[in-house]
Amino acid sequence: MLNTFSSAFVVALLAAALATGMPGQVRAQGKASPVEVDTVREEALTQTAPVTARFVAVQLGPVATRISERIADISVRAGDRVNKGDVLARLSDNRLQAQRQLRAAELKKSDAQRTRAAANLAKAQQMLSRTEQLRGSNAFRMNALEDAQRDLEAAAASLAETEAETERVRAELSLTEISLADAAIRAPYSGVILTRHVVAGDYVQAGDPIVTLMNDTDLEIEADVPAQRLAGLREGIPVNAVLQNGQRLSVAMRAIIPEENPRTRSRAVRFTANLPADFVQIAENQSVTIHIPIGIVRQVVSVHKDALLLDGRTPRVYVVRDGKVEMRTVTIGESLGNRFEVTAGLEIGDVTVIKGNERLRPGEPVAVQVKG
C-alpha cells in the first residue's frame, strides 16, 4: 500500500511540474487573449520647464447697488450658483413707487398745459390772420396788427416753455422708473456667490457692494515666467498643463503682460484654457503647472505609456505580429503627456499592447479588441 501511494504522489508531482513549466504552450493551445492596442507613431517633442501658475477669473468682483435704500430681501448665500439676470436682492421700493405716481401726475399736468398753450398759439395765429385781412379797409388799425403779432410771439414762447417742461417731467419719470428697476439687484453674469455683504434691513448707499460674484466657468491661467523663458512662447501655440491631482489639459498663450517684476525678473503670462465638461471644479487661485517650451522642436518616435512593462528591469513592450505577441526591449526618453519617446526597440507603425499585457507570454495568440 505504501509503495502504491508513493508512486501516485510522484506521478502527481511530475504532472504539476510539467504544467507549471509550460505556461506558454498551454496558453498557445487555448483561446486567444483579448487585448487593446496602440500604434507607435511620430510626433513633435520639445524640451519644457515647469512653471507654477494659478487660475484667475476673468469676471470677479462685487455687485453693487446703484441707488441708496434699505435692503428688503436678499435671496442668495455664499456658494449659491446664479444665472445672468437672476435677482440677488431687492431694495425697499415704496418711496420709488410713490415718486413714480407723482412724476406721472406731473407729466399729465404738463401735457394739459402744453395742449392749452398749443390752443392759445392757434388762436393768436387766427387773430393775426383776421387783422391782416382788414388791411386796406377803414377798419384796419396798425396798432391792432402789431398787438396780434406780439400775441402770436407770446403764444409761441409759451408753447415752447410747456413743451420743455413736459420733456423735463418725462425725463424725471424715466429716471424714477430706472431707479425702481434698480431696486431689484440682478446678476450681471452667471457664476457663484463668494461673499454676501449685507442682510435684510441694512441701509446701503449707491455703490455699496451687495455680494461678490465670480464666473467660475470663464477662467484663465496666469504664470510668472522668467524673462529668459519667454522666447519659447508664441501666441495661440498650445502648451501642456497639469493640475495638482494629475489631470492634464492643453492651454494656449493669450498675452504677455508688458511689466517685469524687478525682484524676480519675471513677467505675468496669461493662458486660455478650454476646460472639458467632466473636469473637476476649478477654483480661483488654484495651482497648476505649466510646461514652458525651452528647446527646439524635434520629431520623435513615441509609444503609449500603458504599453510599457516596468518591473525593475529594462522597459519592455509586447508587439502584435500575425495575431501573436513578441516581446521587445525598448529604450525610452522624454515624456510626452500620456506617451514616451522611444529611442530604440520600436519603429513607426508597430502595434503595441496597452491593455491586457500584464499576463501575456511571448508567442501567445491575442484577439485585438476595439475601444468602445
Image (cartoon, grey):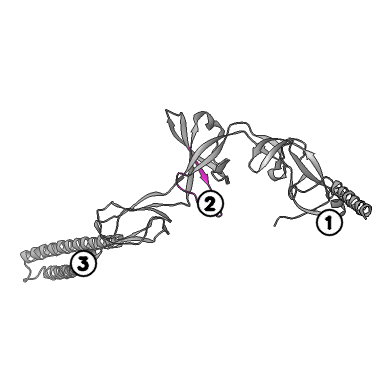
- Residue 361 magenta: no
Residue 287 drawn at (x, y percent): 49, 42
What is the three-letter code of the residue carrying label 2?
A: Val
Q: Tell me if residue 172 can be seen.
A: yes
Q: Earlier in the sequence, mark 1 or mark 2?
A: 1
Q: Residue furthest front?
A: 1
Element at label 3 = helix
Element at label 1 = loop
Residue highlighted by disc 2: 280
Asked whether the beta carbons under mark 1 and mark 2 sit within 8 Å of each other, the answer is no
Residue 59 drawn at (x, y percent): 42, 49
Q: CA separation, marks 1 and 2? A: 41 Å
- Residue 278 magenta: yes
Q: CA separation, marks 3 and 2? A: 50 Å
Q: Residues within 10 Å of mark 3 (few under 14, many from 20)?
A: few
Q: Is residue 53 above or below residue 134?
A: above
Residue 316 drawn at (x, y percent): 75, 40
Q: Is residue 173 above or below residue 2?
A: below
Q: Earlier in the sequence, mark 3 or mark 2?
A: 3
Q: Is residue 97 left or right of residue 127?
A: right
Q: Is residue 71 above or below residue 365?
A: below
Residue highlighted by disc 1: 31
Task: Return the mark for residue 98.
Answer: 3
Magenta range is 269-285
What is the three-letter code of the residue carrying label 1?
A: Lys
Q: CA separation, marks 3 and 1? A: 87 Å
